[in-house]
Image (spheres, rainbow, N blue to C red):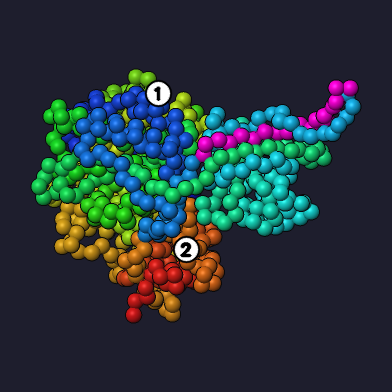
Amino acid sequence: MNRIRTRILPIAALLFATAFPATAQKPPLLPDQTISALSNELSGEIAKRNLEAITRFHRQRGSQGFHSAAEIILERARAYGLTDAQIFQFPADGKIYYGTQRSRQPWDAEFAELWEMEHVGFHSPDFKVLGDGWSPTRKLASYEAEPVTLAEDSESADVIADLIDVGNGTKESDYDGKDVKGQIVLVASQPGSVQDLAVGKFGAAGIVSYAQNQKTAWSGEDENLIRWGHLESFSLNKTFAFMFSLKTARAYQARLAAGERIKLHATVKAGQHPGFTELVTATIPGADPQLKNEEIAFSCHLDHQRPGANDNASGCVTILEVARTLQELINEKKIAPPARTIRFIWPPEIEGTLTLLNGKPEFAQRIKAVIHMDMVGGNQNTKSVFHVTRGPMSLPSFVHDVAWAFGNFVNEQSYNFATGLPAQYPLVAPEGGKEPLLALDAPYSMGSDHDVYQDSSFKIPAIYLNDWPDRYIHTNFDTAANIDPTKLKRAAFIGAASGYYLATLRGKESAELSSVIGANQSVRMAAVMFRVMQLPDHEKMGVLNARVAYERALPLGLRLFLEDPILAPELSRDKTGTFPEAEPTGDGLLVFSRKPEPKGPLAVFGSDFFADHTKPVGIATPKLIDYEGLWGAGEEYAYETLNFADGKRNAQQIRDAVSAEYGPIPLELVIEYLKALEKVGVLARAK
């Protein structure tokens, strides 16, 4: 899990207040016998045993560690009786593009150590001083012991050099008065954000970083955490970087500030090499002759630093446990085979999913919905909150209401059990906790493979199950000891029930599904009104119209799911609106549509499609990229602005839609970004 966390704020509080009905619920949407079968068969312990196997490996993209983890997944999938279990390989040479994703070469490391050196003198047998030198005295980092101490994409080196503190290291002024040529710089930023300046411009030999984790309430609380670091995959200034804890970095900063000379010896055997982007996939075949070519997919991401337990071995083993459970129950005839095929996918994060959907476009055509799991097992030590996350407003879908029906059911059952009330399905693992789940029905947030599926190139609705915050994310403390088998079982239940329901759904919507959707719509609109009250009067109508249009589109989204998409009416914004609003003028009338290629979001992983194509033509970074709204930030505005450019909405309507989602944004910023996308060939202007 990476990058953005949407600010949920008051809307989550309103939705959370609905989580615990006063009376016990009957199971939603699925028959009681199916709920009972899932509850009895799903095992948090089996999932955690598989997690312990995967977390032994440093699972960077294309690496031997990733391949070893993939082989474990493949072996388990075959042992569980899944169909078509295989590892796909896609060439990754640093040049091939899969849609908007520039393939990154695999990266492997054989050896890396960082030592502090001690100044020593050399003496003859009669104790005459012959000279002086440096000798290793303290090992500071070892790739063999803790792979996270070596930044991803480090290159081979053997360097003895002084350590020089340059603060953040991201501005030229950080280097004023400091001769770093041939030396090792100590920086507070991620290595990739300083390498072109420190190494490329000022000639540093290498980097030591103490970059901190994603900001949460617990940031900096544990100074012993070492964060996963990475260099830029495509930088011309190849170098190496080691990662320090905040505690270690502060100790060295104090010594340097006191005028002490500190010399380090860095030895690295590592580097990028041509190879493959690999991913594992397997299926439970659909049984309906008319629907078996449609698929419900379970997704995760298998890559990460070791141990990478919650992020994201937890998601990988949870969908594996869903696969085992569904196949076992089908074999035992406790549940019927699904009408649609159920597919399970274990790729590298974002780049693997984007590679698959572009490299094998038939997958994108067959998948009707996705259940994506990224961090679903954190125990109370991680301080995590579990989310059942909705999709973006650009892609209205009923599948999120299905997921929340089961999430809300688990909330109620687990809360009742924890407080001594009757609970038929507490979903407690023998080796796990007994506390309530307390899941949130959360609005869309970015940062994992669900962004790819729901991009306007593919328009595949994705249910996103995820923990946030997690105080150990991307650190050496993201260990199996912090994973709760009960949490794994409950996440597996929500995912399995949602996926199985969608895989068996056919014909017309049921009265119960209509009731579920309607109840959630009422809660969402109450939350929208709470937000609208915070807005100036001239913003209220645009936000309300966009939100009402979103809710009106949900039944059409269900028809698109149940019927042939070619025959179903196209999903589009209700342009008539519900409330009066100002008519657009000037550039606000411009209409843009997404070109067929390239496919995928522009915020990918390890490469930057937008920057790669704007720099050669001299386009400045649009101001929208750095915009801070009430409920979202620049990358989120950019993602949805592109998604809303459907050839029907004009620029003013796009602006109103993203404002309804993330907070008001000036129209001129949206227009500037749309025109930039046109110049780089992503959008075409309607005549």
What residue is pinned by disc 2?
610
Q: Which structural element holds mark 2?
A: helix
Residue 121 inside the magenta-drawn segment: yes
Vertical comparison of 617 with 147: above or below: below
| Residue 129 x %, y % | 88, 29
Q: Residue at x 24, y 26 (%)?
A: 41
Considering the image in quadrants, where does the N terminus appear?
top left
**Over which residues does the magenta segment extend?**
109-126
The one nearer the camera, 418 or 214, is: 214
Vertical comparison of 329 with 595: above or below: above
Q: Residue at x 42, y 75 (%)?
A: 588
| Residue 358 x %, y % | 32, 56
| Res 433 label | 1
Q: Residue furthest front?
A: 125
Residue 681 inside the magenta-drawn segment: no
Asked whether residue 660 is in view, the answer is no
Asked whether residue 338 is in view, the answer is yes
| Residue 386 x %, y % | 41, 37
The one nearer the camera, 159 or 551, is: 159
Q: Is residue 130 left or right of residue 178?
A: right
Q: Which structural element holds mark 1?
A: loop
Considering the image in quadrants, where does the C terminus appear?
bottom left
Q: Is residue 345 left or right of residue 4?
A: left
Amino acid beneath label 2: Phe
- Mark nearer the N terminus (2 vs 1): 1
Quarter of the image for residue 590 reads bottom left
The one nearer the camera, 28 or 84, is: 84
Q: Residue at x 41, y 63 (%)?
A: 641
Q: Give the alpha-carbon distance from disc 2 to disc 1, as whole Å.
A: 45 Å
Amino acid beneath label 1: Gly
